[in-house]
C-alpha cells in the first residue's frame, strides 16, 4: 500500500518449496503463452514474485515496491524489445497501459485501491498489452469481477468488517495468470483468443 516500514518482508528471503514449484509452473506458462518474444521479460519477473506478492498482500495488506517496481523496468525493456523487433513503436500497448494507469490512479485517489495495486496493474497491463491490448483489459475486468464477487460473499457471511480493505493484489495476479493461461491454451490450439 505504499507505506515504508523497517520490518523484514516475509517469505522473500526464505521461500517455501511450494513457492518454488509455483514459480516453475508460472515460468512454463509464461513461455507457453508468448515464447521468446516481447512480454516474456515481464512475465518472468511476475512469475518469480507472484507467490511472495500474494502472501505479503494477504498478511500485510501491501505490495512492497521492492517486488513491484522492477516489474515496471521489465515492462519498459519489453516495450523497447517490441519496438526494435517490429520496427514500429507499440502505440496500442502504450495507450492501453496508460489508460489502465489513469483508471487505477483515479480509483486510488478516491480511496478504492492502494498504490501497490496501481503499480502492479500497470506492470501487468504493460506486459499483456504487448501481446494483445484486449488481454490487458480482460485481465483487469476479470480481477474486478472476481473482487466484487469475493467482497459480496464476505459481506453476506459477515466475515470482514465493512471498513477493512481487501487485499486486491492476489486477485489482480489470479486474473493476470488466468489470462496468460488462456493465451497459452490459445497458442497450442486448444482455444481461440487474439
Image: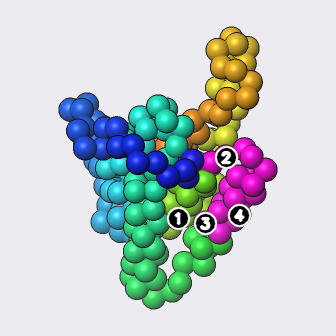
Whichever of callouts 1 and 2 sits on the residue coming sooner in the sequence is 2
Residue occupied by mark 3: 97
Please state the extent of the stretch shown in magenta in the rendering. Answer: 97-114
Residue occupied by mark 2: 113
Instruction: Report the residue that reaches farthest toward the right.
Output: 110
Whichever of callouts 1 and 3 sits on the residue coming sooner in the sequence is 3
| Front: mark 4 or 3 | 4
Mark 1–mark 4 Cα distance, whole angstroms, equals 13 Å
Q: Is residue 98 magenta?
A: yes
| Front: mark 1 or 2 | 2
Whichever of callouts 1 and 4 sits on the residue coming sooner in the sequence is 4
Q: Position of residue 48 (x, y in %)?
A: 31, 50
| Front: mark 1 or 4 | 4
Q: Is residue 40 magenta?
A: no
Do the numbered discs 4 and 2 sit on residues whose CB atoms are within 8 Å? Answer: no
Q: Position of residue 134 (x, y in %)?
A: 61, 58
Amino acid at each position: 500500500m505504499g507505506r515504508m516500514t523497517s520490518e523484514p518482508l516475509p517469505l522473500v528471503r526464505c521461500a517455501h518449496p511450494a513457492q518454488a514449484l509455483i514459480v516453475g509452473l508460472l515460468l512454463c506458462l509464461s513461455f507457453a503463452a508468448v515464447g521468446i518474444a516481447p512480454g516474456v521479460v515481464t512475465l518472468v519477473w511476475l512469475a518469480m514474485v507472484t507467490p511472495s506478492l500474494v502472501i505479503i498482500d494477504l498478511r500485510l495488506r501491501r505490495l512492497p515496491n521492492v517486488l513491484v517496481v522492477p516489474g515496471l523496468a521489465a515492462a519498459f525493456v519489453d516495450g523497447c524489445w517490441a519496438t526494435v523487433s517490429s520496427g514500429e513503436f507499440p502505440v496500442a500497448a502504450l495507450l492501453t497501459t496508460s489508460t489502465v494507469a489513469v483508471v487505477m490512479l483515479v480509483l486510488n485517489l478516491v480511496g478504492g485501491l492502494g498504490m501497490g495495486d496501481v503499480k502492479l496493474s500497470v506492470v501487468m497491463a504493460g506486459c499483456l498489452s504487448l501481446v494483445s491490448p484486449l488481454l490487458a483489459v480482460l485481465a483487469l475486468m476479470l480481477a474486478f469481477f472476481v473482487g466484487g464477487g469475493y467482497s459480496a460473499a464476505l459481506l453476506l457471511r459477515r466475515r470482514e468488517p465493512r471498513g477493512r480493505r481487501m487485499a486486491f493484489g492476489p486477485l489482480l495476479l489470479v486474473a493476470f495468470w488466468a489470462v496468460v493461461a488462456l493465451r497459452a491454451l490459445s497458442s497450442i490450439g486448444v482455444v481461440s483468443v487474439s
